[in-house]
């Protein structure tokens, strides 16, 4: 479904040149969920942004459904690929009602005629009732906002959803609800996910395969299964696993691997 | 436990708003010795307001009442502003969530630490400078002299938070309140910051109040945990006995986290019982 070949993202030139993503390749099957894990600055979000045209593709190729994407991306591309951002407080227009937020993609793609039924259906899909239709973002909780952001991405019936830390701004109990929703939607609608997160447990929960990134490079591609059984070969992946288990007074050694 | 360092009884924080009165903290009581106490809860549970009320940092129009709010025998509610000033930053310090917002952007890190030290100790500039450098070294800065002359925007989040800890500990406080000190940091960096915090707190025998939304982290870091829900403490337990939590809220919070070990699907979600908030 999605094929990333030797992707490079470079910002600036000369002395100011920053190689945000260096030679990253991976492949995602139709209907699969793929995770990108790493710390801040590892380039995981930049990969997502490069796929959907928010960051420049400086080298390599991005193929969706076997076809290479064009810059700027076409409308057909955005009909196939949609994105959900990290912060539901910042990604919804504060002065647009839910109805207006959800009808915008339809308007852009010239599908306004059955807008009402589709908006109501999109709300239903993300577990919100029709009573939410004319609310403003400030009248919604964080979890409800993220549901609206997901509904906005789904209203065009895309095949691929790019999820950039969709739950990291949410409380633990709300995170569980959103993860369940994403899991359900994928099964019901046959979606393909790419999920970016710094939380290994979240990625392992939602995705079958994942790529560990560091300093813009791919460190290791592994499976959720392997993570669960603790079979990560890479030292860096190991230290991420350790860190996700909580603080421990004893383990001083693995920290050394992280220095620098 | 001998005489407690901090004694809080029936602490209440109210906000009188146009739309009515909101009670953010509703009768919290606890005692703290020289130990690590965790306060856990979700957004809006009143955990941060509890920490702020102790320091007298409740923003207006907030109103703080308590049957008792005493630090080392000093009543914090009736203490004069002058007394509070010597306590705040001197004997009680606070580390906030995001170093980006809690450091002064137009002062070098070194100057800020010197300022904090000189506000509470009669010390010359040279002595304050030595103290600041020693403190930067204590928080494991690789090159203290260089960091000393950097501005906050020139350092990473983890370094900023360590600088913040250095500033807060330079006056040798008896009590440190850390409000989500690692939430803005990467997992591996936050482990490093926690390790430094842990060492310093143990070494100096301070009391620590660690406020966080992360139950797992708090239970692995603290001795005792208070779980807050809707402004109340719903459960108090030894951190190592977290698995035997009794309250359905604590149990629900524990269960709804995805884990690496087992694959539960769908994740159990939290059914909030209105009775918990009563």
Image (spheres, grey):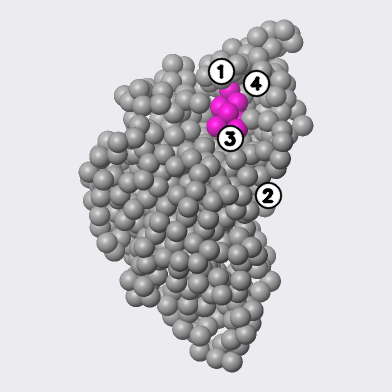
Tell me residue A75's x, y (percent): 60, 74
**Quick one: quadrant of the C terminus of chain B?**
bottom left
Instruction: Write the residue at 31% across / 56% down.
Output: A208
Q: Could you confirm whether marks 2 and 1 are on the same chain?
A: yes
Instruction: Write the residue at 60% across / 40% down.
Output: A19
> Given contact means CB atoms under 8 Å apart, are the residues at marks 1 and 4 in contact?
no
- Mark with earlier residue (3, 1): 1
Instruction: Write the residue at 56% across / 47% down.
Output: A8
Q: Which residue is mark 3?
A: B157
- Mark with earlier residue (2, 1): 2
> Given contact means CB atoms under 8 Å apart, are the residues at marks 2 and 1 in contact?
no
- Mark with earlier residue (1, 4): 1
Q: Residues within 10 Å of mark 3 (few under 14, many from 20)?
A: many
Tell me residue B245's x, y (percent): 26, 47
> Which SS class for mark 2?
loop
Which chain is mark 2 on? B
Q: Which residues are magenta?
A: B156-166
């Amino acid at each position: 479904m999605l094929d990333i070949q030797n992707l490079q993202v470079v910002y600036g030139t000369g002395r100011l040149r920053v190689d945000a993503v260096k030679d990253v390749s991976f492949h995602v099957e139709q209907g699969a969920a793929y995770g990108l894990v790493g710390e801040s600055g590892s380039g995981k979000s930049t990969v997502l942004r490069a796929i959907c045209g928010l960051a420049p593709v400086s080298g390599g190729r991005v193929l969706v459904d076997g076809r290479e994407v064009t810059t700027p991306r076409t409308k057909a591309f955005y009909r196939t690929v949609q994105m959900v951002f990290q912060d539901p407080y910042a990604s919804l227009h504060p002065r647009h009602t839910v109805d207006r937020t959800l009808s915008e993609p339809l308007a852009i793609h010239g599908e306004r005629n059955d807008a009402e039924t589709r908006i109501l259906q999109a709300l239903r899909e993300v577990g919100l009732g029709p009573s939410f239709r004319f609310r403003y973002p400030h009248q919604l909780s964080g979890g409800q906002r993220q549901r609206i952001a997901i509904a906005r991405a789904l209203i065009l019936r895309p095949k691929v959803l790019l999820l950039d830390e969709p739950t990291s701004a949410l409380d633990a109990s709300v995170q569980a609800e959103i993860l369940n929703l994403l899991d359900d939607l994928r099964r019901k609608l046959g979606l393909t996910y790419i999920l970016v997160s710094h939380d290994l447990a979240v990625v392992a929960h939602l995705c079958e395969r994942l790529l560990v990134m560091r300093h813009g490079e791919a460190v290791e591609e592994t499976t959720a299964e392997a993570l669960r059984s603790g079979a990560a070969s890479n030292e860096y992946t190991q230290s991420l696993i350790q860190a996700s288990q909580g603080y421990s007074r004893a383990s001083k050694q693995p920290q050394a691997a992280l220095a620098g | 436990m001998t005489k407690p360092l901090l004694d809080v009884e029936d602490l209440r924080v109210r906000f009188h708003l146009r739309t009515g009165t909101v009670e953010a903290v509703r009768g919290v009581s606890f005692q703290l010795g020289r130990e690590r106490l965790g306060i856990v809860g979700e957004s809006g549970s009143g955990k941060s307001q509890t920490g702020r009320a102790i320091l007298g940092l409740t923003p207006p129009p907030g109103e703080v009442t308590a049957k008792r709010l005493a630090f080392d025998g000093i009543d914090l509610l009736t203490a004069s502003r002058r007394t509070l000033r010597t306590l705040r930053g001197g004997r009680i310090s606070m580390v906030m969530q995001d170093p980006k917002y809690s450091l002064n952007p137009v002062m070098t890190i070194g100057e800020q630490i010197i300022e904090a030290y000189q506000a509470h100790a009669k010390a010359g500039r040279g002595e304050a400078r030595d103290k600041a450098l020693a403190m930067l070294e204590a928080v494991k800065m690789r090159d203290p002299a260089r960091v000393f002359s950097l501005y906050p925007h020139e350092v990473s989040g983890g370094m900023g938070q360590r600088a913040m800890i250095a500033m807060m500990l330079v006056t040798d406080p008896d009590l440190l309140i850390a409000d989500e000190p690692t939430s803005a940091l990467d997992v591996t960096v936050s482990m490093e910051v926690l390790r430094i915090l842990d060492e310093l707190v143990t070494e100096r025998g301070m009391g620590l109040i660690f406020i966080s939304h992360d139950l797992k982290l708090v239970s692995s870091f603290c001795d005792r945990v208070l779980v807050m829900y809707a402004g109340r403490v719903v459960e108090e337990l030894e951190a190592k006995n977290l698995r035997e939590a009794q309250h359905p809220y604590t149990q629900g919070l524990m269960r709804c986290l995805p884990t690496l070990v087992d694959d539960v699907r769908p994740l159990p979600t939290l059914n909030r019982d209105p009775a918990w908030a009563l």
